[in-house]
């Protein structure tokens, strides 16, 4: 695959901002490496690199809440990616549509969360105690 020249960080990762293609709402930010980017472009499904688990992951592999790529771009510095996707289910592992569900006032106070969760994460993900 012939990827454009991108600027990965020292760990070989690049941030990927994910936005709903229809609503334009920012759903999440995750990290990708060259292999996860290639897999994403080859399959049309979002693939990421998990820094905490140190492994490749396909969005929705556990939850069934998938992301199909509609279009993608790199920013002007080629160090951040933007993906517009068709989201199935919630994007956030906490159950919300977006990982950016918590708003704050200008002085940093949390605003009451107005949206409802789309799913119960305790029922969706296997918990390891």
Image (cartoon, rainbow, N blue to C red):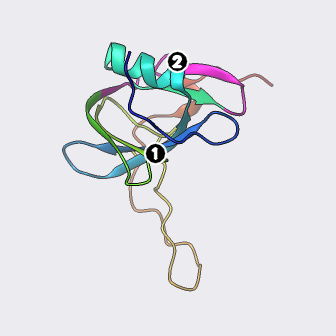
Which badge, 1 or 2, comes first in the chain's sequence? 1
Count neighbours of disc 2 (C-alpha within 10 A) and say few if under 14, some if 14 to 19, many if 20 or more: few
Q: Quadrant of the N terminus?
A: top left
Question: Which residue position holds label 1?
Answer: 28
Expressed as whole percent of the image width and height from the top left, the position of residue 22 reads 18, 44
What kind of element bears circle 1? Answer: strand
Vertical placement of residue 89 versus 22, above or below: above
Vertical placement of residue 51 versus 102, above or below: above
Q: Quadrant of the C terminus?
A: top right
Could you tell whether 122 is left or right of 112 in the image? right
Helix, strand or loop for the magenta stretch, by majority: loop
Question: Which residue position holds label 2?
Answer: 62
Q: Nearer the viewer, residue 13 or 94?
A: 13
Expressed as whole percent of the image width and height from the top left, the position of residue 123 reads 55, 25
Q: Which residues are magenta?
A: 51-68
Foreground disc of the pair 1, 2:
1
Quadrant assignment, res 55: top right
What kind of element bears circle 2? Answer: loop
Quadrant assignment, res 11: top right
């Amino acid at each position: 695959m012939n990827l454009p020249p991108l600027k990965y960080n020292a760990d070989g990762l690049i941030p990927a901002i994910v936005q709903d293609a229809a609503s334009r709402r920012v759903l999440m930010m995750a990290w990708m490496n060259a292999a996860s980017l290639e897999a994403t472009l080859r399959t049309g499904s979002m693939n990421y690199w998990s820094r905490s688990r140190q492994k490749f992951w396909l969005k929705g592999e556990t939850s069934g809440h998938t992301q199909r790529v509609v279009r993608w771009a790199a920013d002007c510095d080629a160090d951040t990616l933007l993906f517009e996707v068709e989201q199935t289910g919630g994007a956030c592992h906490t159950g919300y549509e977006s990982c950016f569900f918590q708003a704050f006032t200008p002085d940093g106070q949390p605003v009451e969360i107005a949206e409802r969760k789309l799913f119960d994460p305790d029922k969706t993900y296997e918990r390891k105690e």
